[in-house]
Amino acid sequence: MQISKSLKRLIYWELGIPISLLTIGIYHGLMQTVYRSGVIHQSQFAHLDYYQGLTLHGVINAVVLTSFFAVAFGHATLTFYFKKEPNRKVAWLSFWLMTTGTLMAAWAMLSGKASVLYTFYPPLKAHPLFYLGAALLLVGSWIPLFDWAGMYMRWKKENKEVKTPLAVLGTLVNFTIWFVCTLAVAYEVLVLLLPWAMGWKQTINVTLARTLFWFFGHALVYFWLLPAYIMYYTMLPKLAGGKLYSDLAGRIALFLFLILSVPVGVHHQFSDPSIPKGVKLFQGLLTFGVVLPSFITAFTIAASLEYAGRRRGAKGLLGFFKKLPYLDPDQFLFAYLICGLFLFIFGGLTGIVNASGPLNAVIHNTAWLPGHFHMTVAGPVFLSIIGMSTYLYSTNSGKRIFLPQVNVIIPYLWTIGILIFSTGLSWGGLIGEPRRTNLGMTYLNPKNELFTPEWVPTTLLALAGGIIMTIAALLFFVVFFGTMFGRKKDEPKLDLPVSEALHDEKRIALFDTFKPWLVTMAIILVISYVPAFLSAANNPAAGAPAFAPDNPVPVQPVPSDRPAAGSPKTSVTAENK
Amino acid sequence: MSAIDKSEKKVLLVTGSVLSLFIFSILYARGRNNDLPECLPFNKTYLEPKVTRLDKETYQVYAVAQMWQFQPSQIVVPVGSEVDFFVTSKDVVHGFNITEKNVNMMAIYGNINKTTVKFEKPGIYKIICHEYCGIGHQGMQAEVIVNYPPGTINNKNQ
Ligand code: HEM
Ligand SMILES: [Cu+2]
Ligand SMILES: [Cu+2]
């Protein structure tokens, strides 16, 4: 269909801004593997400090890119299925809030005033504009939900007995999750962090802030993932040349995500004090509930691919794998999606390890974690984002893909890189290599007393993988910006691949309405999070003053009855009682 | 269409029962053996780093993390001792990781984290800070030295 100039421009900017920033994010990804493997033994390179770079890497890749993309993709999806455009003013308001927020945070990070990583745990303090920027980005990204919800209700009124298109359902589920979880982080940022960072409030309850953050933080990963899921259900079968095995399976999976994505965030705090074991156990169990929609999806997609392969003439039990359009430049989205799906197998398996308490004690905060989530967020999420960005840009502008043969091999190159990279990190994590650490200065520096030779092979593997990933990313930039600067050749149109359903089940009211699911979501949330918030609010003692990353003395003087920092190093052996 | 196929019903039933069995086993095992860090109320005495010997083989360590060191920076205990670690922070969030023993805790201002481990083999066990805590983070380390047989501790300390 044809869309207005305004919407077209909006989508271009919402893809173009984060992808331009991504160049900074990728650069720091590469540099992290360089520092960590001990190729350089310094705190900074080209005037950018390791931890400043890591903050930029996390914020740009995992928050800015994913939020902008989810909004752009949501606009495209609703417009395409409803044949109606979203409200112009609301859409641009959301854009400007997100962009202003991103610029504020980018300024704070680039000027070195916010090296607090993308989790911004207090009492490390960043520049207030970093927090404000983050809040604007989040708020801006959920504004379109209200407009979309209106579009959905108007459509529903006219189409009472028609199933809501699966992609629309997915978008609405995703942004509902997003809205609910961002309430917590907005509270953390606006009520706890900002007044404290401005110096109006002296102290902060660190555990409460962490608990609020992870209420948001785990749902965040589903917010990253659901656009990819929407593509797996509604596009991949079509691209493969087949049909979606079951449409109902997709709906069930989506509603299960709605109720299970948020009330599990405490699984990131298994190692935290002040949160009772029972709360950890309960949320740990709920986490495994997410296995259900994940497996429903895995089997439904596998069945859809099998159907496609057989239609292409495949024989035998697994012959269909050989018949899929892996390297077809005209179906390049297939390559991006299938590579992501493949990586997600390993992402899921390592995720099960993280979610179980006792195993988590082996790997919590070690290099295993980045090993895991580069196979999720830098796997299916990232590949579907960059593939779909190229696709949306090219079809909407009528410009042909620059270097189509290169475009279709990018995801394979990236996948090889990630597999090597994550092997190195996961192995390192199992033998104690910490994450978020500039290893090159100490542990990977042969001249330092902390030198740990066991981590030489693991960090070198990560470096090798990182180099391959960087090459793949550079090729992507060439293809994306090459397409952008090309000339218009075809009729521009908004067009998404649409999979028909093989088993197009009758409309079941329960799986085509939000109310019962929203109520269930609220109940589970209350049960699992009220005890967590109460213990986080009440168990800790005095709140903490603010600290800058380069100084053990608090930014403001400590109130007298609180501990002061900076006593000399001591060596204590056992004393008798 | 809407009625569920017989074989599908069977599959659903089997999956359901396997799943319940699974969840029940997890609950049972975790209920009996839950070694997640314990939830303790804060008390200022925890801010004074020390190693206390409770009896021949039982020790208490008050470990205090701060930018960018642990106190005590060396903890000496005999082989076979069981050690309770009480961990807190004087400033930002730190990590407290003893890889060989799967001790994995966060040290947080105003909060006490606790776990118990038994050191059966002699050796030097590194304690590594594995949460970013500022510019000196990559050098923040301490160690548990497990070296001499039980019973000889008094001689060593005098
Ligand atoms: C060339 C590609 C990339 C390389 C070489 C790379 C490398 C790394 C490394 C080595 C770390 C761990 C650093 C540490 O803990 O000290 C890291 C962290 C991280 N990466 Fe990447 N990465 C790449 C691309 C991506 C992409 C595409 C995403 C997401 C879309 C991503 C998301 C993250 C996140 C969220 C973290 C955690 C940051 C933190 O701990 O605060 N990375 N990356
Ligand atoms: Cu999580
Ligand atoms: Cu540290």
Image (cartoon, helix red, strand yellow):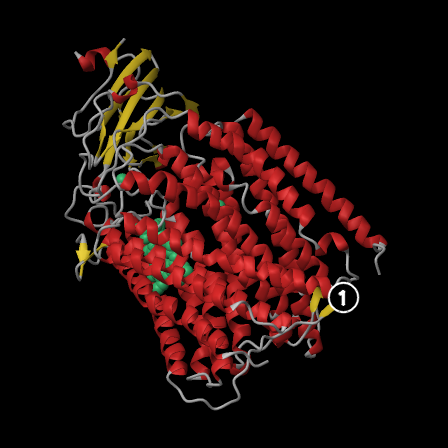
Q: Quadrant of the C terminus of chain A?
A: top left
The secondary structure type at the circle numbered 1 is: loop
- Left/right placement of residue A61 relative to residue B34 reads left
| Image x and y of residue B3, in percent | 85, 55
Looking at the image, residue B146 lies above or below residue A266: above
| Image x and y of residue B39, in percent | 43, 24
Looking at the image, residue A301 lies above or below residue A278: below
Res B49 → quadrant: top left
Residue A96 can be seen, yes or no = yes
Tell me the chain of label 1.
A
In the image, what residue type sits under mark 1? Asp
Looking at the image, residue A103 lies above or below residue A407: above
Res A421 → quadrant: bottom left
CB at mark 1 closer than 8 A to ligand 2?
no
Residue sitting nearer the eye, A343 or A428: A343
| Image x and y of residue B86, in percent | 34, 23
Q: Residue furthest front?
A: A89
Q: Which residue is mark 1?
A: A504
Q: Quadrant of the N terminus of chain A?
A: bottom right
Residue sitting nearer the eye, A10 or A117: A10
